[in-house]
Image: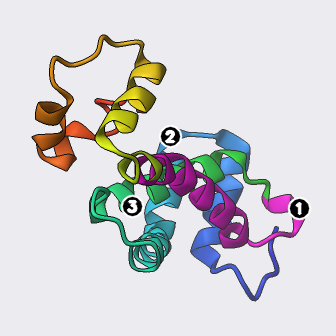
Amino acid sequence: MDNPQVLSDEERLLWQQWLCLREADTRTRLFFFHSPWSRTVAGYYYNRYPHPLPQWHDYLSLTSQGLLQAIDGFDPLRQVRFRTYAEHSSRAQYSRGCLPISRISAQSPANAWKASAASSGSAPPTAISSWWSTTPSTSLSATSLNWG
């Protein structure tokens, strides 16, 4: 396990239960135990890398996904702090989620449509100008671009 000075008794017990049983309830309790830290990481990315399309909840969702992946893959017997391990998962989720949106929105409307159509295989819109005039939150969402 981690260094005894680093882990609280509650966290140590949760990790022991998770290693033995791998129950959904224990995973959920670990998630909520570390969720304040996850919100801090989301706030860091939100303030450090502002963008008009992703909103606060998008950052929070991505770091929460990274936290869940980190819980699933973490081995407390390796003598590594969990938050150090989880930071990499959260950063990877942020990179997969927010950076592609940033790249597409930086392109012209025609190039943005080509990039999204190439990944989804959809037919071209009748007028790209009408497509671009829709609100960015609906026209460039991860769902409409088939990213998530």
- Does residue 26 appear anywhere in the picture? no
Q: Residue at x 78, y 82 (%)?
A: 4
* Residue identified by numbered label 3: 59
Helix, strand or loop at mark 3: helix
Q: Classify 64 as above or below 147.
A: below
**The quadrant where residue 148 appears:** top left
Helix, strand or loop at mark 2: helix
Q: Which residues are magenta?
A: 76-102
Q: Earlier in the sequence, mark 2 or mark 3?
A: 2
- Could you tell whether 54 is left or right of 82 in the image? left
> Identity of the amino acid at label 2?
Ala
**The quadrant where residue 128 appears:** top left
Q: Is residue 45 magenta?
A: no
* Foreground of the two, 146 or 63: 146
Q: Are marks 3 and 1 in contact (CB under 8 Å)?
A: no
* Foreground of the two, 16 or 38: 38
Q: Residue at x 44, y 67 (%)?
A: 35
**The quadrant where residue 109 appears:** top left
Residue closest to the far bottom: 5
- Could you tell whether 16 is left or right of 76 in the image? left
* Residue identified by numbered label 2: 24
* Residue identified by numbered label 1: 78
Q: Residue at x 40, y 47 (%)?
A: 107
Counting other residues with Cα less than 10 Å from the Cα at mark 2, is it few (<14), some (14-19), or many (20 or more)?
few
> Identity of the amino acid at label 1?
Arg
